Image: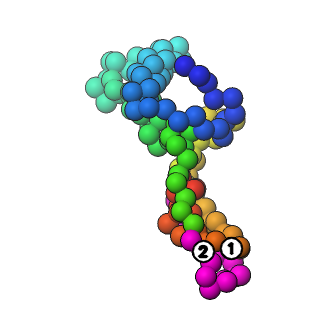
Amino acid sequence: MELLKKSNGNLPRTQEEIEQMIDNAADAYAGFLNAVGFDYTADRQTVDTPRRVAKAWLKDLIVGSVTNEPNITTFPNDDHYTGLVIQSSIPVVSMCAHHNLAFTGYATVGYVPGDNVVGLSKLNRIVE
């Protein structure tokens, strides 16, 4: 499997590849838990933790790294709008590549239109 070379990179994967990555990551995380002294299988609350962690990474935290970039449709700027276009309070859930810890927050995106404009919903997709 080809590996990402940059922490904020993007390498789209098929659904089958993502499922295989979840399986591989769950096995690896189970080994990690054992390596740091946790018998995750001894407690019914944590027996599925390795798979939950793997799914959280691939389906929530790094989803933008394994999926296609969003399709962004632009429209002609027929009204010749030149003011700032802003979309704020866009929820962000991501992964700190340096510490491998999840973080959450809100993003604000703005741009000044040229010949074309982008719909506000597309700004949310760009952040995701």
Q: Is residue 87 above or below residue 82?
A: above
Amino acid type at mark 2? Pro
Residue density around tag 1, few if under 14, some if 14–19, many if 20 or more, within 10 Å: few
Q: Which residue is drawn at 42% across and 22% down?
A: 20
- Residue 85 at what x, y percent from top left? 64, 75
- Residue 62 at what x, y percent from top left? 54, 39
Q: Which of marks 2 and 1 is nearer the N terminus?
A: 2
Work out whether residue 113 can be spotted.
yes
The stretch drawn in magenta includes residue 28: no
The stretch drawn in magenta includes residue 83: yes
Q: Which mark is residue 76?
A: 2
Residue furthest to the left: 44
Residue density around tag 2, few if under 14, some if 14–19, many if 20 or more, within 10 Å: few
Q: State the extent of the magenta-drawn residues as a range.
A: 75-91
Q: Nearer the viewer, residue 56 or 38?
A: 56
> How far is disc 2 from disc 1 in space, using C-alphas?
6 Å
Q: Contact, CB < 8 Å: mark 2 with mark 1?
A: yes
Q: Which residue is drawn at 66% across and 83% down?
A: 81
Q: Which residue is drawn at 55% across and 47% down?
A: 69
Quadrant where the N terminus sits is top right
Q: Residue 115 carries which label?
A: 1
- Residue 49 at what x, y percent from top left? 39, 28
Q: Which mark is residue 8?
A: none
